[in-house]
Image (spheres, rainbow, N blue to C red):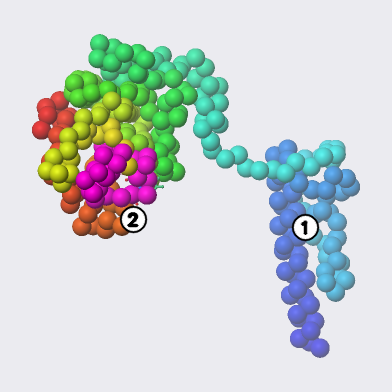
Amino acid sequence: MQRMVARRAAGAALAARSTGQQAVRSATARSRGVHTTPPTGSSNAQRSAPDADGINMVLNTTSAAPKGAVPDFIINHVAPIHSGSQWLQTKRQSEEERFGEAALEGGYKSFREDIRSVVPDSRVFTDPLRTLAYGTDASFYRLVPKIVVKVHDEAEMIKLVQLAAKNKTPVTFRAGGTSLSGQAITDSILLKLGHTWRYRKIEDDGKLITVEPGWILGQVNRMLAPYGRKLGPDPSSIESCWIGGVVANNSSGMCCGVSQNTYHTIKDLRIVMFDGTVA
Ligand SMILES: Cc1cc2nc3c(=O)[nH]c(=O)nc-3n(C[C@H](O)[C@H](O)[C@H](O)COP(=O)(O)OP(=O)(O)OC[C@H]3O[C@@H](n4cnc5c(N)ncnc54)[C@H](O)[C@@H]3O)c2cc1C
């Protein structure tokens, strides 16, 4: 008998705690102007609730809730999720017209001026929409670049990296943008290679191929198919990723393992160094 009473008391305490939490939740929501309690009558917290055995419980309430009329509708409160459009809205409100080139400062401002003679304005993006669009890759990170430049060839690339070094502005490269860990995003300068990087040369009956970084990996494999050959790395992003990204990421893939990954199948590289020299 004693044990039964003790069990009943413990059950009541449990019920009181959970209903008490509900009361605090309701009061917090109300103080935020959001109402999750039933539309009419006094609050749940002030009511007494029967437990499983029909014993009434008196619950403590919080005084945080403001006095006033109870709303006649309920809003399901969903916490705001950070999104690109929200970021854009905040930026619009806080910075008004200070967008794009007007917002550039220091080295970024002079880099923008310096590259006017290198790349036409149609391939330089500083506007909020396109910089936001280039602020993501296949990862869940977001970094919005200050300037995005579409680079068409090696001569442009040499001048751009030299000017970036001069202005002390970091650069990040982007190919297909399928990186899974944020490698293709930056809050500085993004140099986006175009599909204009299209040189190709097949040698030794397809055993060797020289390509520029603008080719998609699947395209290169189709060039090699008549020779019964293909490239080693086979990421499942094969129809989206580009040679530049494959090489810089040391891509592996679904079947190639380590023995056929990029590093183990590459013979030679032509690299533009940070000071513009080509190695
Ligand atoms: C669905 C899916 C499946 C995937 N499967 C695999 C997989 O099986 N195996 C695997 O290894 N990866 C995989 N990946 C990751 C990614 O697709 C590959 O690593 C791919 O090779 C990246 O190529 P990209 O053209 O998208 O490069 P990006 O993401 O644009 O860039 C990759 C890196 O290379 C740099 N870069 C790009 N171009 C140049 C350049 N010209 N010069 C110097 N640096 C440059 C960038 O700065 C960045 O650091 C997968 C991704 C997705 C979305």
SS class, disc 1: loop
Is mark 1 in CB contact (under 8 Å) with mark 2? Answer: no
Q: Earlier in the sequence, mark 1 or mark 2?
A: 1
Q: Quadrant of residue 72?
A: top right
Q: Dot 2, how many residues are within 10 Å of its Cα: few (below 14), some (14-19), or many (20+)? A: few
Q: Residue at x 31, y 16 (%)?
A: 112
Please state the horizontal and vertical placement of residue 23, each as a whole percent of the image: 75, 54
Please state the horizontal and vertical placement of residue 109, each as a whole percent of the image: 32, 16
Whether residue 35 is visible: yes
Please state the horizontal and vertical placement of residue 228, each as a whole percent of the image: 23, 49
Whether residue 184 is visible: no
Quadrant containing the C terminus in the rendered view: top left
SS class, disc 2: loop
Give the side of residue 236 with respect to residue 228, left or right.
right
Q: Quadrant of residue 163?
A: top left
In the displayed structure, 216 sits above or below 53; it is above
In the current view of this chain or complex, which residue is farthest to the bottom?
Answer: 1
Please tell me whether mark 1 or mark 2 is closer to you in this view: 2
| Location of mark 2 (residue) | 254
Q: Examine the structure image and report whether residue 237 is included in the region drawn in magenta.
A: yes
| 197 and 176: which is toward the camera | 197
| 92 and 259: which is toward the camera | 259
Q: Which residues are magenta?
A: 219-246
Q: Which mark is residue 60?
A: 1
Q: Is mark 2 within 8 Å of ligand 1?
A: yes
Q: Is mark 1 within 8 Å of ligand 1?
A: no
Give amino acid for label 2: Met
| 148 and 75: which is toward the camera | 148
Q: CA distance from mark 1 to mark 2?
A: 60 Å
